[in-house]
């Protein structure tokens, strides 16, 4: 029954008698006890599972040693470094932690070690040292990919100590595997910044400037947003990349204009670069004789930095550190080599159809270059200096037509030669395969752009 509370609201209170409550409690205990006995009975009749069989080992099992054996004292410590732009032999030896007395002098003077005179950016140098830091061998992988009887080989220079306390230099070679790599990037700050972002070796970057140097001034013409797509050779041995070969195809979009280049070898031996229409790029002039620099004085009237007063400047000045390599801008013949009044150390090259070029203020000339020698486009002819009338190290470069200087930055350079008709079919087949790869990169880039814009 229910009883009203003090505030007049119903209060739900059980009014079972004490007797009834005791009976219910006893009955509950009995039921619980019966349930426990029933559970115990059920447990008593369950058959336990059979024990798993036991096997006896007939011989001891060898366990892996958690403490591997230390390296033998005779095991060499091998280190490796890649050649960077501007590296010297001394800098490379320092990075490899080589402090062998007399080694650098040997490398500079020994004729058998002459391949180390040319340090190609992107290629590697390895060294093996013993536990005391003494040199066991030094290897310069100077030619990672060359063809020898139709097989790709890697060639390197190996230096080893001899028993007399000196060194021995031997050229070695081994089979190499060639792969074709494709890459692309966008100019944001500089060309090398873009190639570094795409993991493209410096050696390939330098080739790019050589190949398109007659079309693009890589000092003045690059703009943010320019893009390039590139296909090049890479060489490996035992699964490890040992260097790169040549560029096979290249597309460079500069100021919304597309420039192309493809390597083509009609006879399978010698070859050259052409645009996709078959026009040779080698026959044209390079825009500049220095790889990378800045223009310090343009063609035309200027106030002379030494004598004062306004005078006509017959060339273009490129400021660069002393010793910067100077390269021929086209195939030609050395018509003058020596000192020439205010020009200082000067080289003049004569080219076809009345063209000539002048390179002044050099610190020194390329070793062995003589008057009358034939030079090829891109060949080293000298080094930047400040000889003659110069206030600082720079190259004074003149481009002449029938001995009259003209502005090399604005003149239309000679048209490149065209591929012979007999090679046209083979050339079109070679171009088609590279265009397919470049088109694939373009499609992927367009897809990424659309995704990013959503």
Image (cartoon, helix red, strand yellow):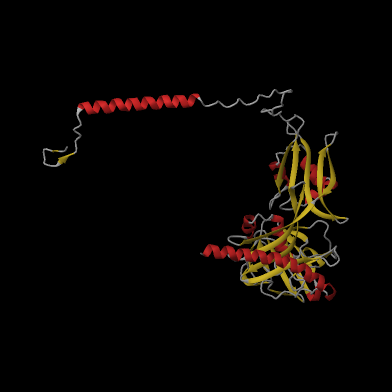
Quadrant housing residue 72: top right
Identity of the residue furthest to the right in this view: 149
409 or 302, which lies in front?
Answer: 409
Question: Could you tell me if residue 196 is visible in this image?
Answer: yes
318 or 377, which lies in front?
Answer: 377
- State the image coordinates of residue 215 (x, y, percent, origin top left): 69, 70
238 or 147, which lies in front?
Answer: 238
Quadrant housing residue 357: bottom right
Q: Along the horizontal axis of the image, is 175 left or right of 391?
A: right
Quadrant into which the N terminus falls: top left
Q: Please tell me which residue is depicted at 19% across the width and 29% down the height of the picture.
A: 17
Question: Could you tell me if residue 385 is visible in this image?
Answer: no
15 or 63, which lies in front?
Answer: 15
Q: Please tell me which residue is depicted at 13% across the width and 38% down the height of the picture.
A: 5
Q: Is residue 40 above or below residue 260?
A: above
Q: Please tell me which residue is depicted at 71% across the width and 52% down the height of the picture.
A: 122
Q: Is residue 296 above or below residue 101?
A: below
- Figure disc tally: 0
- State the image coordinates of residue 34 (x, y, percent, origin top left): 38, 25
Q: Is residue 444 above or below residue 163?
A: below
- State the image coordinates of residue 144 (x, y, percent, origin top left): 78, 52
- State the image coordinates of residue 439 (x, y, percent, origin top left): 67, 67
């Amino acid at each position: 029954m229910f009883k009203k509370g003090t505030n007049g609201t119903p209060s739900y209170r059980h009014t079972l008698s004490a007797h009834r409550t005791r009976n219910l409690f006893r009955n509950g205990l009995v039921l619980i006890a019966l349930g426990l006995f029933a559970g115990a009975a059920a447990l008593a009749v369950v058959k336990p599972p059979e024990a798993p069989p036991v096997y006896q080992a007939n011989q001891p099992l060898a366990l892996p040693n958690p403490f591997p054996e230390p390296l033998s004292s005779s095991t060499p410590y091998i280190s490796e470094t890649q050649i960077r732009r501007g590296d010297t032999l001394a800098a490379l030896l320092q990075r490899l932690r080589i402090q062998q007395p007399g080694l650098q002098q040997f490398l500079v003077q020994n004729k058998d070690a002459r391949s180390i005179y040319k340090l190609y950016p992107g290629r590697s140098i390895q060294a093996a040292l013993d536990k005391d830091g003494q040199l066991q061998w030094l290897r310069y992988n100077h030619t990672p990919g060359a063809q020898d009887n139709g097989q790709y080989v890697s060639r390197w220079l190996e230096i080893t100590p001899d028993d007399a306390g000196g060194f021995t230099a031997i050229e070695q070679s081994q089979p190499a595997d060639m792969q074709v790599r494709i890459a692309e990037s966008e100019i944001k700050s500089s060309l090398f910044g873009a190639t570094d972002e795409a993991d493209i070796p410096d050696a390939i970057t330098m080739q790019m400037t050589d190949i398109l140097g007659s079309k693009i001034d890589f000092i003045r013409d690059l703009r943010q947003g320019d893009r390039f797509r590139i296909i090049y050779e890479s060489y490996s041995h035992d699964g490890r990349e040992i260097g790169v070969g040549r560029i096979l195809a290249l597309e460079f979009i500069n100021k919304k204009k597309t420039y192309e280049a493809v390597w083509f070898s009609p006879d399978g031996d010698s070859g050259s670069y052409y645009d996709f229409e078959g026009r040779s790029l080698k026959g044209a002039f390079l825009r500049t004789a220095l790889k990378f620099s800045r223009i310090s004085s343009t063609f035309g009237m200027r106030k002379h930095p030494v004598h004062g007063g306004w005078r006509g400047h017959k060339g273009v000045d490129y400021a660069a550190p002393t010793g910067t390599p100077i390269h021929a801008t086209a195939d030609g013949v050395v018509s003058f080599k020596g000192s020439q009044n205010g020009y200082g150390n000067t080289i003049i090259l004569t080219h076809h159809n009345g063209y000539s070029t002048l390179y002044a203020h050099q610190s020194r000339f390329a070793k062995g270059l003589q008057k009358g020698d034939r030079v090829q486009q891109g060949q080293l002819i000298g080094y930047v200096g400040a000889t003659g009338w110069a206030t600082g190290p720079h190259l004074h470069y003149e481009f002449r037509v029938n001995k009259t200087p003209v502005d090399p930055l604005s003149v239309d350079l000679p048209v490149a030669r065209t591929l012979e008709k007999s090679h046209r079919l083979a050339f079109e087949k070679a171009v088609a395969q590279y265009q397919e790869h470049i088109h694939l990169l373009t499609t992927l880039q367009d897809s990424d752009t659309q995704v990013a814009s959503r």
